[in-house]
Image (cartoon, rainbow, N blue to C red):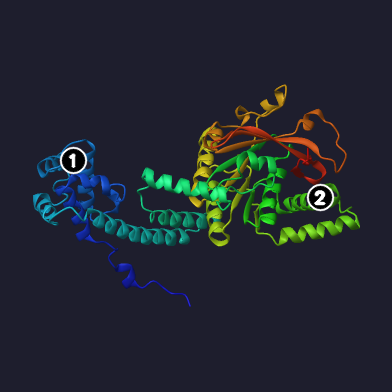
Amino acid sequence: MKKELSPELLDRQPPCNLDAEMGLLGSILLDPQVIDDVAPVVRVADFFDDANGRLFEHLVAIHNDGSKIDRTLLTARLKNAGDFERIGGAAYLARVSMSVPYAAHANYYADIVRRKALRRAVIDAGAQIIQEGYDERGGEDELLARAESTIFQLAERRVDAVSTHTAKDVMRTTLDTLEARRAGSADNGLATGFTEVDQLTGGLKRAELSILAARPSVGKSAYACNIATNAAVRSEIPVLFISLEMSTSELGDRLLAAEAQVDLHHIQRGTYTFQERAKLVEAGGRISNSSLFIDDSPTRNMTSIAALSRRHKRKHDIGLIVIDYLQLIDPESHKDPRQEQVAKITRRLKVLAREIQVPVLCLAQLNRQSEQSGDHIPKLSHLRESGAIEQDADVVMFVHRPGYYSRENVPSGQGEQAEIIVAKQRNGPRDTAKVLWFGSYCRFDNQPQFDP
């Protein structure tokens, strides 16, 4: 049975604690230095009473100017701004000054003010969501994305705004991590399944944005699919694959071909043999039993990508997000210059990775300069449309296949020499990893290891 909102509930005063607001202001008047403790926690908008918010704003401004806070200076500033009578004049200032005997509990008052403001924000968000729900002009997917984003932003405010740690705390955590790594029990990066790449990068790290770039048809989507399959099938880690280029049917064919090592053309034409069919069924079972989630909506912007990612993190605890590919992500504003659009997208991808503590692997296109160079080796300057891609990424990798440009024919089932070039790594070396490319399977694999 649907529960209706009662008029009594709608008419109730929003959560607030005016005594705590006055206590916080009185504490600042008694000891202005407490502003440095409470300013990271409380904002002007957190005060329910407008007069209290104005007073707090002026007190912080005086403190930031390096001036000493006293009632005479505060009164002069309020009068100059036309706020003296608005806050209640000398009588209200006197009342605030006498609200607390000492400033020792300023942090306690600030916490109360912040928590009450959070409750009011939840109420306001609910009202906004209700209003937008009645508005028939927008699409349902966009409505849900906005609602989820609003609530998630409120959830972030629960975290203490003070993020400064002592050197002692940092070193204790770092040394504990070092010991855990030595013992093999640390939470290391997610293995890509490619030995040389993992040795070079340590895997895909939590909260990091990795860019995988190449020219069209070189194999970046295939390599990303291989990484996703290795993580989901062999490491049993839930993976969200956001495909803006290919449909689920196309991806399904590629995933099967790579996992079963069956010629993709045989799958697409239905000309596979009886033996190949058995391999496809077995590979299909392995993929089906994995936690690989594929979204093939061709028109997603960063708001919907972030909402989708948060939802899968919450429901399935995903350990990797793969996005194919960056230049197909819809900009929030089509009026911005293209470079600015891409810069905003890469920045939000980086924020998303840190926000949900999951590695984000985003594919990107290279410009034509890589094909015009003599050796065809991709470089950071070849990243298409924006230098912000290089700036925001923690790792930038390129897929390079010399055979693609020499047009050499490799027999089916025989691997072609290829390279994964780590062109940027914020916390590691730059180098090149050798891999094999099996074009008929849409599959990259490790180079065979020979004993010396």
Residue 319 x/y as whole percent: 59, 53
Mark 2 lies on residue: 261
Q: Residue at x 70, y 52 (%)?
A: 229
Judging depth in this view, the residue of 450 and 319 nearest the camera is: 450
Q: Left or right: where does residue 346 sit relative to residue 415?
A: left
In the image, farthest residue toward the bottom: 1
- Residue type at mark 1: give it: Ala
Would you say residue 138 is visible in this rendering? no
Tell me which residue sits at (36%, 53%) in the image: 160
Q: Which quarter of the rendering shows the C terminus? A: top right
Please tell me which of labels 2 and 1 falls first in the chain. 1
Q: Is residue 336 depicted above or below 94 in this figure?
A: above
Disc 1 target residue: 81
Task: Kindly state the secondary structure of the residue where label 1 is placed.
Answer: loop
Closer mark to the observer between disc 2 and disc 1: 2
The kind of secondary structure element at disc 2 is loop
Q: Residue 362: image x %, image y %? A: 61, 43
Identify the residue at the far front of this view: 452
Q: Nearer the viewer, residue 26 or 9?
A: 26
Q: Residue 249 or 192: which is nearer the viewer?
A: 192
Image coordinates for residue 280, horizontal then vertical, percent: 82, 57
Which quarter of the figure has residue 108? bottom left
- Asked whether 261 or 53 is in front, the reply is 261
- Tell me the residue at 51%/58% (across/down): 144
User: How many labels sit on residues?
Assistant: 2
Q: Name the quadrant containing residue 324.
A: top right
